[in-house]
Image (cartoon, rainbow, N blue to C red):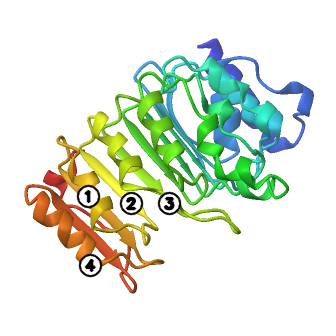
C-alpha cells in the first residue's frame, strides 16, 4: 500500500514540475510510475511487477532515467528505440536476471556490441544501430566486424541482426555458429561497409549447418550463387527460408537451386517493388 502511495505522490510531483534530477526513485514501484509518466510502455504481472518495457524514444529519456530500468528486476521483455546510450551506459541490463527478449533499434551512441554480451536473453534483435557505422568511420574493420564483439549468450535461440550490425564475411558466420549454438531463428544482413566487399563463400555458409535452424532470413544476398544456396540447403533442420531482395536482387536460378535441393522448405522472396519484407505462412516459419 505504501508503495502505491509513494508512486502516486511521485506522479503528482512530476506533473507539478517539482521533482529534481536528484530525486529519481530508488525502488521498483517508483521507477514504474516515473517511467510511465515519461510515456514508456510498461506491462505488469498480477503482483504489480514490471515484466515488459517498451520505449519509442520520444519523449527522450536522460541517461540517469534509463538506469531506472535496472530497478525493474522482473522484466522479461524489453524494446528500446533510439536510446542515446554509449558503451559504458548499458550496465542496467546486467541487473535484469529474468530478461528473455531484448530489442534495440536505431542506437547511435555505441560503436560495439560488447555491452549486450553476457545476458540471459533467448531473443536478441539489433537493427539499424548506426553508431556501429558512424563511430567507426576511421576504423572500417571495426565496423565490418561489429558482430564479433557479441558473445556469451548461452540461451540465445533467436538472433535478428540487420542494417548494422552487418555480416559480410565468413568469419562472422563462423563466430555466430560457435558462439550461439542454440540458434533456431536467424536473420542476417550481408551488406558490406562502404569501400569493402561482401566475401561470403559457400563454405562459409556451410558452418550454419551446425545450428538447429528452423528459420533463416537473408538480406542483401545479391552475391549468392547456386552453390551458396546449396550450402544453405544443407541445414537439415530448416523449415523456412526468407530472402529480402527489395534493395539488391538475388539470382532466380540460385533460388531455384535451393528449391530443387529442398522442396520440403517453405521459401518466401520479396523482390524490388514488394510492399514489405518476405513472410512465410504462420505454420511454416518455425515460430
Which residue corresponds to mark 2? 218
Q: Earlier in the sequence, mark 4 or mark 1?
A: 1
Counting from the top left corner in percent of width and height, residue 39 is at: 65, 48
Give the answer, above or below, for where 7 lies relative to 109. Answer: above
Q: Say whether marks 2 and 3 touch (CB < 8 Å).
A: yes
- Say which of 280 and 36 sits in front: 280
Quadrant of image for the N terminus: top right
Q: Say whether marks 2 and 1 touch (CB < 8 Å).
A: yes
Quarter of image, res 35: top right
- Say which of 142 and 201 sits in front: 201
Which residue corresponds to mark 1? 241
Quadrant of image for the C terminus: top left
Q: Is residue 100 left or right of residue 152?
A: left
Q: Is residue 214 left or right of residue 60?
A: left
Q: Secondary structure at mark 4?
A: helix
The residue depicted at 62 percent of the width and 32 percent of the height is 116
Q: CA distance from mark 2 to mark 4?
A: 14 Å
Q: CA distance from mark 3 to mark 4?
A: 18 Å
Which residue corresponds to mark 3? 190
Q: Earlier in the sequence, mark 3 or mark 4?
A: 3
Q: Is residue 154 left or right of residue 284?
A: right
Q: CA distance from mark 1 to mark 3?
A: 15 Å
Amino acid at each position: 500500500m505504501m508503495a502505491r502511495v509513494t508512486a502516486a505522490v511521485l506522479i503528482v510531483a512530476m506533473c507539478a514540475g517539482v521533482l529534481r534530477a536528484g530525486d529519481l526513485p530508488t525502488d521498483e514501484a517508483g521507477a514504474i510510475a516515473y517511467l510511465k509518466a515519461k510515456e514508456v510502455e510498461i506491462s505488469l504481472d498480477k503482483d504489480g511487477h514490471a515484466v515488459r518495457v517498451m520505449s519509442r524514444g520520444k519523449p527522450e529519456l536522460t541517461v540517469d532515467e534509463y538506469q531506472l530500468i535496472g530497478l525493474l528486476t522482473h522484466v522479461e521483455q524489453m524494446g528500446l528505440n533510439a536510446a542515446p546510450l554509449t558503451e559504458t551506459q548499458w550496465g542496467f541490463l546486467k541487473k535484469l536476471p529474468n530478461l528473455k527478449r531484448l530489442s534495440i533499434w536505431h542506437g547511435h551512441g555505441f560503436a560495439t556490441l560488447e555491452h549486450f554480451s553476457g545476458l540471459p536473453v533467448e531473443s536478441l534483435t539489433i537493427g539499424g544501430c548506426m553508431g556501429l557505422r558512424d563511430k567507426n568511420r576511421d576504423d572500417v574493420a571495426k565496423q565490418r566486424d561489429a558482430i564479433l564483439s557479441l558473445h556469451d549468450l548461452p540461451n540465445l535461440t533467436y538472433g535478428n541482426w540487420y542494417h548494422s550490425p552487418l555480416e559480410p564475411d565468413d568469419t562472422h558466420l563462423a563466430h555466430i555458429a560457435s558462439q550461439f549454438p542454440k540458434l533456431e531463428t536467424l536473420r542476417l544482413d550481408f551488406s558490406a561497409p562502404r569501400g569493402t566487399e561482401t566475401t561470403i563463400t559457400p563454405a562459409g555458409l556451410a558452418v550454419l549447418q551446425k545450428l538447429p535452424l528452423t528459420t533463416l532470413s537473408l538480406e542483401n544476398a545479391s552475391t549468392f550463387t547456386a552453390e551458396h544456396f546449396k550450402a544453405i540447403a544443407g541445414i537439415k533442420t530448416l523449415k523456412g527460408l526468407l530472402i529480402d531482395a527489395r534493395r539488391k536482387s538475388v539470382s532466380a536460378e540460385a533460388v531455384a537451386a535451393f528449391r530443387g535441393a529442398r522442396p520440403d522448405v517453405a521459401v518466401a522472396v520479396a523482390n524490388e517493388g514488394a510492399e514489405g519484407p518476405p513472410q512465410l505462412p504462420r505454420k511454416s516459419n518455425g515460430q
